[in-house]
Structures are given as C-alpha cells and as structure tokens.
Amino acid sequence: MLRTALLRKLAVCILVLAIGNFLASVFYWYTTLWWLDIAAHMLGGMSVMYAAGVVLANSYGKPATVSRYVWLSALIALVIGLLWEGFEYYLYTHYGGPRFSPIDALSDVCFDLAGIWIAGRSILSRMQAIGSSR
C-alpha cells in the first residue's frame, strides 16, 4: 500500500520533470526563467526521495521504524544530489558551458533538500495514515 502510493507520487514527479525539461530545452527557459532551476531541483529531490522510499519499502524483511526509513531515504537522496553537483562541476570544467558557481551549486543542494523535506513529510504522513509507524 505504501509502495503503491510512493510509486504514484514518483511517477507524477518524473513526468512533470520530463515534460518541463523538454519544454525548457526547446524554448530555452533555463536561461530566461531564473526560477525554473529551483523548481527542477525541488522536484528532483522529491523524485529521488520517493524512489529511495520505494526501494526501502521492500528491502527490509520487517518494516523499518519511521525515523530510520525517512532518514535513510533522505540520506540517499542527499548523496545523489551532491553527486549530481559534482557531475555538473566535472562537465563545466572539462567541456565548457556556463561558468561554474559555488553559490549556484549550494543553492541547488538547498533546493534538493527542500524537495527531500517535502517528500519526507509526505512519506511520514502516509506511513502514519496506514499505521506503519511504531
């Protein structure tokens, strides 16, 4: 039941990200709409958190405690966000493109964390609603 709810939320986040990224690429919105990167990172953080939640929902023989479940999902999502920023840094330094900005990277990670927090609150409320909390 929890896995199905998380899969639905994950599918919505990925669909919105895919369509938004496609449109942003076609219409050059990333360079003209300053806030689009913020929304993309928040949805990305939410997507990774929901994906980690789906994986963790079935990885234990017995249900994990709520706090361990959410913290482990958040840690996985944060690590992926940091790895993504490292990947962007690598691309900027080796292949050119826009100049790398540490402030932008820090804000991206902060908005990843905001998305992780939103998804974590959603997962917590869902787990408590179905009685999975201990």
Image (cartoon, rainbow, N blue to C red):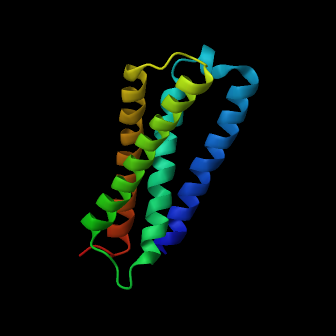
> Residue at the spot x=32%, y=66% of the render?
69
- How many numbered marks appear? 0
> Residue at the spot x=63%, y=43% of the render?
16
Q: Nearer the viewer, residue 99 or 6?
A: 99
Query: Is 56 drawn above or below residue 108 in the view shown?
Result: below
> Residue at the spot x=57%, y=61% of the render?
8
> Residue at the spot x=67%, y=42% of the render?
18
Could you tell me residue 56's position as x and y percent? 42, 69
Seen as rendered, the residue at the extreme front is 94
Could you tell me residue 55's position as x and y percent? 48, 68
Q: Is residue 37 left or right of residue 126?
A: right
Q: Quadrant of residue 7?
A: bottom right
Q: Is residue 26 left or right of residue 36?
A: right
Could you tell me residue 93's position as x and y percent? 53, 24
Could you tell me residue 72's position as x and y percent? 33, 61
Query: Is 118 drawn above or below residue 36 in the view shown?
Result: below
Query: Is 46 drawn above or below residue 65 in the view shown?
Result: above
Q: Nearer the viewer, residue 63 or 87?
A: 87
